[in-house]
Amino acid sequence: MLYQELPRIDSTPLDKWGRWLVPGLIAAVGVTVAVILLVVGQSSFAALAFFAGLGAGGIVYLRSPAESP
């Protein structure tokens, strides 16, 4: 059977994903922990985890280098 050989997945860069991918994951972890704490009944800790996750994601986003054209 003939098939087209595709490039390896690690041979291509993430293009424009690199700047927001890690901050997005950090913010998602904060939101997930906040939801779990909210379900358990710890609303004050849930608010703290929510804002800490968003803040940490924002800081990482601002400290990452800007994309060059």
Image (tube, rainbow, N blue to C red):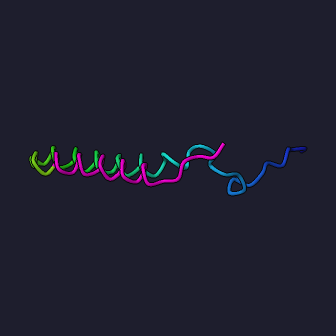
Identify the residue at horizontal 22%, vertical 47% (top origin): 34
Give percent across and percent down for residue 44. Answer: 9, 48
Give percent across and percent down for residue 47. Answer: 16, 45
Identify the residue at horizontal 30%, vertical 46% (top origin): 54
Extreme right residue here?
2
Position of the N terminus by quadrant = top right
Identify the residue at horizontal 15%, vertical 44% (top origin): 38
Q: Which residues are magenta?
A: 46-69
| Residue 2 shown left or right of residue 9 in the figure | right
Does 62 appear in magenta?
yes
Position of the C terminus by quadrant = top right
| Residue 56 shown left or right of residue 45 in the figure | right
Q: What is the tally of numbered marks visible in this picture?
A: 0
Give percent across and percent down for residue 64. Answer: 48, 53
Above-or-below relation of 11 to 41: below
- Of 59 and 40, which appears nearest the observer? 59
**Which SS type dominates the magenta stretch?**
helix
Give percent across and percent down for residue 16. Answer: 59, 43
Does 48 appear in magenta?
yes
- Of 40 and 69, which appears nearest the observer? 69
